[in-house]
Image (cartoon, coloured by chain):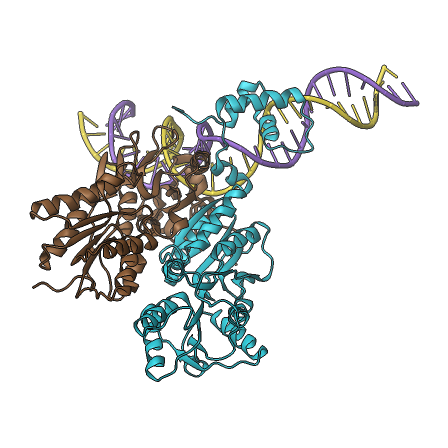
Chain colours: A brown, B cyan, C purple, D yellow
Amino acid sequence: MASKRATLADVARLAGLSPTAASMILNGRPDTRLSQDAHDRVNAAAEALGYRPNVAARGLRTDKTLTIGFISDLVATTRFASGLITGALAAAEEAGHVVLVVETGGDPARESEAIGAVLDRQVDGIIFATMRARELFVPDIPAGTTAVMLNATNAKHPTSVLPDELAGGARAVELLVEAGHREGIALLGQNDDVEKDLFRSATVARRVAGIRGAMAGHGLEFIAEESIWLWEPEGGYQAMRSLLDRGVVPRALVCMNDRIAFGAYQALSEAGLAIPDDVSIVSFDNDELAAYLRPGLTTVALPHEAMGRRAVELLLAGGVAGETLIPMPVVTRASIRAAG
Amino acid sequence: MASKRATLADVARLAGLSPTAASMILNGRPDTRLSQDAHDRVNAAAEALGYRPNVAARGLRTDKTLTIGFISDLVATTRFASGLITGALAAAEEAGHVVLVVETGGDPARESEAIGAVLDRQVDGIIFATMRARELFVPDIPAGTTAVMLNATNAKHPTSVLPDELAGGARAVELLVEAGHREGIALLGQNDDVEKDLFRSATVARRVAGIRGAMAGHGLEFIAEESIWLWEPEGGYQAMRSLLDRGVVPRALVCMNDRIAFGAYQALSEAGLAIPDDVSIVSFDNDELAAYLRPGLTTVALPHEAMGRRAVELLLAGGVAGETLIPMPVVTRASIRAAG
DNA sequence: AGGACATGCTAAAACCATTTAGCACGCTGC
DNA sequence: GCAGCGTGCTAAATGGTTTTAGCATGTCCT
């Protein structure tokens, strides 16, 4: 099969025309004056030979390769944020592009190396993605190469795509309020006093601001706030236990992420408290976990896939300075008691 | 910054030599007779200009691009098997290669398209990966392009990398036996009678064979076997409930995957049964979940990352016909009661 | 009749690196 | 004095495409 790829010259020969003509016709050059007959012959020849242009050769000439570089710290690795890749791949495919994925583990040396590697391959642009939204250091890249920051920000490269955490944070509180909760609401994971020295991702601050803004807007106050060092189930479990041990039994919980919520589920279950009858829970991220819990966890989703898509759209549009905020959809399951 | 990339010609000019000489020196051609002085001058010039070869141009001449195509159905998408990508990326990077990732969603038309797209970019070889191990249909690819099947098999492309499910299945049973379990062992997820019409991934059969082989080897029999339609937590929960409702209380559980085990945890917890004191659980996959459960789930891991690595190693070695089986490591946590 | 212009096409350069073939020079050996 | 050979290097072709510049013809206008 296909012993040798057909080249443009082959097509031209078969059509009885010059490679110049064949190239112009196949690329649909607008202002050309080639006859309809020539068009037909070239198209037929290309079809017959199964001709596909050699991207490397074309890229050499045009500096366009229909290829995007996707450089990330741990996105593919951690499976958590892999939706970013998924979205980027899908959008790229729709635009006829292909994606070169490089994972650096966050190591600056490998980051430089990665940029070199994708630049060597003449990519049309680079997306820098991080697993957790943050300011990302980016080595110099040649002027003229457009870059977009995905789930990240960088002073030199102003085009960035982020989740709309401010609105998302507020939305979580609204969900509780709409279900009739006005008292006994606790916050798990965040406590400004304790957290101010901790490094959290850049967007956590916005999430918190959204939450506090909505609480204040409704004239509500948290009955308790528990800080959690590692936002993992174990931490959520301990925090919930500690709350219960101190005798505070909330009627509703805002958890900073789904894994914390999972831990809370476990502690609540041990204490014989039912979700959502005794306590409602709302959370963030829409981790895989959220669907597995019983009852299903209602959560404000990190729109990873939409973000990935948007990043390549912006990249192909040449980059639009400024932050693009992607809405965080709420995924309604069964962890919030019915209104009333 | 870097207004224009330096070309080989620039390096040669600065070194006062011909491009030919510069090329030979930079590529470390063995049999050349260029002087030490020439070597030094070229290397210095390349360094000074920050020269990096243009991969497209080189590929045009040599047909080698240091790029690997990774075509998968849902690997990046589902985050479950994303370790396959991670491993492949890491191994590729170590070998100085870069990976073009394309996701097809399992759609044959997009699969063909994807192959075309990566071939257009002159990849050195293609890895076909599937999320769940299975026989994969692969459109024709030109002879001479090496292909390796990752977590998949294909008659035309005999090089494949698979988890060693037979040994892994047996190992799970051994874990229980080593902890002193000989009676009251139930199997959750698989029941040959019911399952024989269901389509499961190609490797499930081996996992089951491993399990049954080890049971028989120790002269043991399952106290019960529950088939589960969808291997998700909900299914595991239902199956465990059904067992309990029928009055069978196992002392140990072999679950076909971690999500089923998660469901079993929930049902057991509701029934007031403690893990591992009342019932031990062993499972498969080492899903993210397994670490989050309380107590932590002991599981026989799907070695996705190692498989991904191995696939690119085989690819770069030119493909080695036959199946390469990657051992499934056991991840010991706390769901099996201590021996005695 | 002859210049201007439109029409339909092509030759050749350019992109950048690799590779084949071979040139020029100096030395050895006879 | 010269054939033969080793040494150190280079000219030019090659790979596949795009693009610039321009060549023939034929038509129209005055």
Q: How many marks?
A: 0
The answer to whether residue A57 is visible is yes
Q: Is residue A177 above or below residue C2?
A: below
Picture coordinates of residue A122, whole percent (x, y): 42, 37
Q: Is residue B142 above or below residue A132?
A: below
The foreground one among B223 and B21 is B223
Picture coordinates of residue B77, whole percent (x, y): 35, 56
Q: Quadrant of residue A207?
A: top left
Q: Is residue A14 above or below residue C8?
A: below
Residue at screen point 25% across, 43% down: A204
The foreground one among B71 and B6 is B71
Picture coordinates of residue B215, whole percent (x, y): 54, 77
Q: Is residue C2 left or right of residue A117?
A: left
Q: Quadrant of residue A262?
A: bottom left
Q: Quadrant of residue A287?
A: bottom left
The answer to whether residue B189 is visible is no
The foreground one among A125 and A217 is A217
The foreground one among A54 and B31 is B31
Residue at screen point 35% across, 49% down: A85
Q: Is residue B189 left or right of residue A133?
A: right
Picture coordinates of residue B328, whole percent (x, y): 52, 62
